[in-house]
Image (cartoon, rainbow, N blue to C red):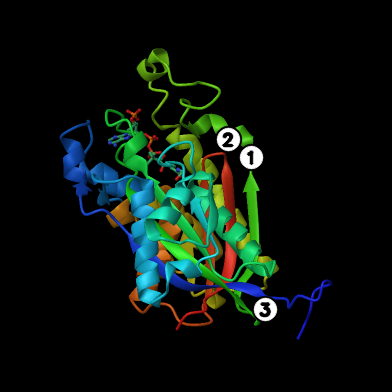
Amino acid sequence: METSRNNRKLVNAEITGVGMYVPEKVLDNHYFETIVDTNDEWIVSRTGIKERRKEENGATSDMSAKAVMDLLKSKNMDPEEIDAIIVATVTPDMFFPATACLVQEKIGAKNAWGFDLSAACSGFLFALETGASLIQSGRHKKVVVVGADKMSSILDYTDRNTCIIFGDGAAAVLLEPTEDLDSGYIDSKLHCDGKGAEFLYMKGGGSLHPCSHESLDDGYHQLVQDGKTVFKEAVKGMADISVEIMERNNLKSEDVAYLVPHQANKRIIDATANRMGIPLEKAMLNIDRYGNTTAATIPLCLTEYYRAGKLKKGDNLILSAFGAGFTWGAIYIKWSLD
Ligand code: UT7
């Protein structure tokens, strides 16, 4: 058995459980034809989205708590076993307290600490890296990583460029230690570049532009995106980083069971799969049903594909994302659940 310098056993992190929640209310493309100048054909052909969900009864902490409860139920696990909760989100219930604290209370995770992490569409990957490090440190045995966003709370429903793209949802994974260092979390490469800040943002409510009558009038409390620029950067960012992580782990296209891409635009996903040399069927998809749920897209994919019996132990998965910041990255995991 390998040991670290302070005599702790070296352990890796692996995903040992998944759970999800999506709201019942469905907004299809035809609904948007009634509120902005758009049509189903444009939305499907330019984005791949057919419908998305809208949370009408709760906030991000409620959606997150439901996703974690779904995970705990599937594992028959007591919430008091959780050591830490990380919530990746850009739509927290409020600035503070952290959404993670509200989730902790809602699910009765009496022994957990937790915090929120803001990295927009890359949020789940950044949170997974953080959660895996807590496990690898040897000081945590059960870490829950949540990706959750209530995008409907920050959308401008008069802007056809953005309101048709995003949706609400939450999903969670459980990380636990394994002594098999070749299983679970194998490699990652994450980036941020603040030069991208001007292309995708929500200006208002922070210390730069505190809430005021003017900030409300100027639409500072809603998401703004220069779609064309973000699209161009996302295609390059996601494809480059996915290929890089394959190459440095000597993975050929046939070794990859699935690309698990952030779901921003079907055309970005196709371009990434093409650059990796993998067939489109090997790219997980839920964008048609949920749109872009920001931090939730990747764990929603993992939960649905696992529950549909499409994943097997040992499968090589490349998780990949690009989003506001800019933030981007890829993570290579060997799937651990049968
Ligand atoms: O997840 C975080 C990262 N975000 C992304 O990765 C999103 C990246 N961007 C995109 O996915 C795409 O850029 C969009 C889906 C946002 C837009 O698609 P596009 O093909 O890049 O369209 P565009 O912005 O170049 O606009 C083309 C035309 C414009 O009309 P004009 O100026 O040529 O007359 C837009 O006004 O399409 C128009 N347009 C629409 N038309 C019908 C924009 N939105 C719509 C709409 N319905 N909903």
Can the viewer see residue 9 in this picture? yes
Give the distance between the C-alpha atoms of the residues marked 1 and 2, in whole angstroms: 6 Å
Can the viewer see residue 292 in this picture? no
From this view, report whether residue 217 is shown above or below residue 272.
Answer: above
Q: Quadrant of residue 119?
A: top right
The amino acid sitting under disc 1 is Asp
User: What element does badge 1 sit on?
Assistant: loop
Residue where numbered disc 3 is placed: 181
Is residue 165 rendered to the left or right of residue 143?
A: left
- Between label 3 and label 1, give the one nearer the viewer: 3
From this view, report whether residue 15 is shown above or below residue 119.
Answer: below
- Confirm or deny contact between disc 3 and disc 1 (CB under 8 A): no
For disc 1, the neighbor class at 10 Å (few under 14, some 14 to 19, many from 20) is few
Q: Residue furthest top?
A: 214
Q: Residue furthest bottom?
A: 1
Q: Which mark is residue 196?
A: 2
Mark 3 and mark 1 lie on one chain; the one further toward the N terminus is: 3
User: What element does badge 3 sit on?
Assistant: loop
Give the distance between the C-alpha atoms of the residues marked 3 and 2, in whole angstroms: 36 Å
Q: Which quarter of the rendered image does ligand 1 occupy?
A: top left
The amino acid sitting under disc 3 is Leu
Horizontal and vertical percent position of residue 117: 54, 47
User: What element does badge 2 sit on?
Assistant: helix
